[in-house]
Amino acid sequence: MDRPDLKKESRRRRRARRPGQVIHPRVAEEMYQRLRAYSARRRVTVNAVVVTALRQYLDQTSDATLLMRRLDRLTRRVVRVSREVELALEFLSVWSRFWFAHTPQLPEEAKAGANKLAAKRYEQMVDHLGKHLAGPQRLATEVFGKGLDDEEPADPEAERNGGSDLPQ
């Protein structure tokens, strides 16, 4: 004898064991076939693929999103380097003009002594430049303002995931 109340109760118990909510999205037949084929190739359930895809979409942790963030960061760095190179070239140009305008031509007999003095002064300049580069103060920061070297903080969640969250 078949008892209908037992069948209903066992069905309820089965549903209660599954964690999560059930959703019923409608997708085109072609999309569904592609989803099933992908799941079969990867040997994972359709549910696992959908959940992973939704998580990546909502958390914005897909490979394309992470790549775009990195490209944006690199673009900002290239713009900053471009401004610094432009500053350096302009400085060199102005310095050269002043040098040639205010430095007299040396007679031939004074050139040997001037070369020795130039080598000594060059070494002093290199030492001073090394100390200046080791410090926090930069000409570009003075010219363009504070916060030039500040970078956007990296997304720790994205770094932890290694860029991809798809099931293998």
Image (cartoon, helix red, strand yellow):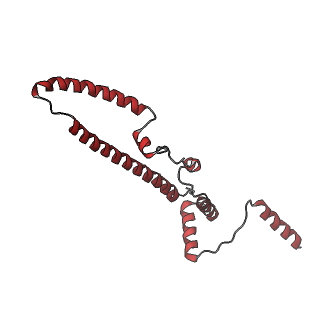
Q: Quadrant of residue 135?
A: top left
* Residue nearest the viewer, comparing 58 with 46: 58
Where residue 51 appears, x then y in whole percent?
Answer: 63, 61
Question: In the displayed image of the protein, which residue is found farthest to the bottom?
Answer: 29
Q: Is residue 109 above or below residue 36?
A: above
Where residue 42 appears, x then y in whole percent?
Answer: 55, 60
Drawn side of residue 136 relative to residue 86, left or right:
right
Q: Please give the name of the residue rendered at 14% of the width and 25% of the height, measured from the top-left corner.
A: 110
Mark yes or no: residue 3 visible: no
Q: Is residue 73 above or below residue 123?
A: below
Q: Is residue 66 above or below residue 129?
A: below
Quarter that holds the N terminus: bottom right
Q: Please give the name of the residue rendered at 35% of the width and 31% of the height, measured from the top-left corner.
A: 129
* Residue nearest the viewer, comparing 52 with 143: 143
Where residue 31 appears, x then y in whole percent?
Answer: 56, 73
* Residue nearest the viewer, comparing 21 with 4: 21
Quarter that holds the C terminus: bottom right
Where residue 120 appears, x then y in whole percent?
Answer: 25, 24
Drawn side of residue 132 relative to residue 119, left or right:
right
Q: Is residue 166 above or below residue 137?
A: below
Mark yes or no: residue 128 visible: yes
Question: In the displayed image of the protein, which residue is found farthest to the left?
Answer: 108
Drawn side of residue 51 relative to residue 42, left or right:
right
Q: Please give the name of the residue rendered at 38% of the width and 49% of the height, measured from the top-left corner.
A: 83
* Residue nearest the viewer, comparing 36 with 98: 98
